[in-house]
Protein backbone atom coordinates (compact mmCIF):
# COMPACT_ATOMS: atom_id res chain seq x y z
CA UNK A 1 0.00 0.00 0.00
CA UNK A 2 1.27 3.49 -0.83
CA UNK A 3 2.63 5.40 2.16
CA UNK A 4 -0.27 7.21 3.84
CA UNK A 5 -2.96 5.45 1.80
CA UNK A 6 -4.12 3.49 4.84
CA UNK A 7 -4.59 6.77 6.73
CA UNK A 8 -6.79 8.13 3.96
CA UNK A 9 -9.01 5.06 3.83
CA UNK A 10 -9.34 4.53 7.58
CA UNK A 11 -12.53 5.91 9.05
CA UNK A 12 -12.57 7.18 12.63
CA UNK A 13 -15.48 6.01 14.81
CA UNK A 14 -18.52 8.17 14.16
CA UNK A 15 -16.83 10.14 11.36
CA UNK A 16 -18.34 10.15 7.89
CA UNK A 17 -16.06 9.06 5.08
CA UNK A 18 -15.06 12.05 2.99
CA UNK A 19 -14.53 11.54 -0.74
CA UNK A 20 -11.21 13.11 -1.65
CA UNK A 21 -8.78 12.92 -4.46
CA UNK A 22 -5.46 13.75 -2.81
CA UNK A 23 -2.47 15.18 -4.66
CA UNK A 24 1.12 15.73 -3.59
CA UNK A 25 2.24 19.35 -3.25
CA UNK A 26 5.39 21.02 -1.96
CA UNK A 27 5.21 23.28 1.08
CA UNK A 28 7.66 24.98 3.37
CA UNK A 29 9.12 22.27 5.62
CA UNK A 30 8.78 24.37 8.78
CA UNK A 31 5.06 24.84 8.16
CA UNK A 32 4.64 21.12 7.52
CA UNK A 33 6.48 20.17 10.73
CA UNK A 34 4.19 22.39 12.81
CA UNK A 35 1.08 21.25 10.93
CA UNK A 36 1.98 17.61 11.63
CA UNK A 37 2.10 18.32 15.36
CA UNK A 38 -1.29 20.06 15.28
CA UNK A 39 -2.84 17.29 13.18
CA UNK A 40 -1.49 14.58 15.49
CA UNK A 41 -2.86 16.42 18.53
CA UNK A 42 -6.29 16.60 16.88
CA UNK A 43 -6.18 12.94 15.79
CA UNK A 44 -6.63 13.80 12.12
CA UNK A 45 -4.40 13.31 9.10
CA UNK A 46 -2.05 16.02 7.92
CA UNK A 47 -3.94 16.11 4.60
CA UNK A 48 -7.26 16.58 6.40
CA UNK A 49 -5.87 19.34 8.62
CA UNK A 50 -4.28 21.27 5.74
CA UNK A 51 -7.33 20.83 3.51
CA UNK A 52 -9.64 22.17 6.22
CA UNK A 53 -7.40 25.22 6.75
CA UNK A 54 -6.66 26.00 3.10
CA UNK A 55 -10.06 25.26 1.54
CA UNK A 56 -11.83 28.44 2.77
CA UNK A 57 -8.96 30.63 1.57
CA UNK A 58 -8.88 28.97 -1.84
CA UNK A 59 -12.68 29.18 -2.16
CA UNK A 60 -12.61 32.93 -1.39
CA UNK A 61 -9.84 33.59 -3.91
CA UNK A 62 -11.51 31.35 -6.49
CA UNK A 63 -14.81 33.24 -6.21
CA UNK A 64 -13.01 36.58 -6.56
CA UNK A 65 -11.09 35.32 -9.60
CA UNK A 66 -14.17 33.92 -11.33
CA UNK A 67 -16.09 37.16 -10.71
CA UNK A 68 -13.21 39.27 -12.07
CA UNK A 69 -12.85 37.03 -15.12
CA UNK A 70 -16.60 37.27 -15.80
CA UNK A 71 -16.47 41.07 -15.57
CA UNK A 72 -13.51 41.15 -17.95
CA UNK A 73 -15.29 38.84 -20.39
CA UNK A 74 -18.36 41.10 -20.40
CA UNK A 75 -16.11 44.13 -20.95
CA UNK A 76 -14.26 42.39 -23.78
CA UNK A 77 -17.52 41.34 -25.42
CA UNK A 78 -18.91 44.88 -25.23
CA UNK A 79 -15.78 46.34 -26.80
CA UNK A 80 -15.55 43.66 -29.50
CA UNK A 81 -12.34 42.19 -28.05
CA UNK A 82 -13.90 38.85 -27.16
CA UNK A 83 -12.83 35.54 -28.61
CA UNK A 84 -13.68 34.97 -32.20
CA UNK A 85 -15.92 31.93 -32.76
CA UNK A 86 -14.04 28.90 -34.03
CA UNK A 87 -15.21 27.38 -37.29
Image (cartoon, rainbow, N blue to C red):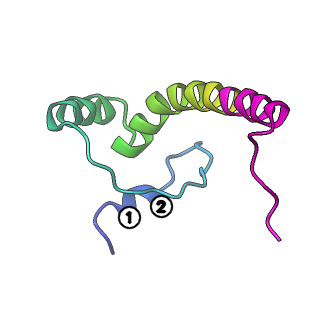
Q: Residue 75's x, y, as percent? A: 77, 28
Quarter the N terminus occupies: bottom left
Q: Are marks 2 and 1 in contact (CB under 8 Å)?
A: yes
Vertical placement of residue 18 versus 3, above or below: above
Label 2 to label 1, Cα distance in Å?
A: 6 Å
- What residue does disc 1 label? 5
- Badge 2 marks a residue whose secondary structure is helix
Q: Crowding near pointer 1: few (<14 within 10 Å), some, many (20+)?
A: few
Q: Residue 67, percent across and down?
A: 71, 27
Give the class, few, some or many, for how many residues have Cα within 10 Å of label 2's Cα (few <14, many ≥20). few
- The answer to whether 51 appears left or right of 33 in the picture is right
Give the label on residue 9, or none: 2
Image: magenta residue range: 68-87
In the image, 12: left or right of 19?
A: left
In the image, taking residue 16 as reference, residue 31 lies left or right, namely left
Horizontal and vertical percent for residue 70?
A: 74, 32
- Quarter of the view holding residue 47: top left
Tell which of 74 and 44 is nearer to you. Answer: 74
In the image, residue 83 above or below residue 49: below
Of residues 22 and 14, which is closer to you in this image?
A: 22
Q: Is residue 54 a member of the stretch shown in magenta?
A: no
Residue at (55% x, 54% y) in the render: 20
Q: Residue at (75%, 50%) from the top-left corner?
A: 83
Q: Position of residue 81 (x, y in %)?
A: 74, 40
Query: Which disc, if any, is residue 42?
Result: none
Quadrant in which the C terminus appears: bottom right
Amino acid sequence: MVNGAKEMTTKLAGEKAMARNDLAVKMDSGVVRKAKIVAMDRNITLAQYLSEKVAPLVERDYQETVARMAEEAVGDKASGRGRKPSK
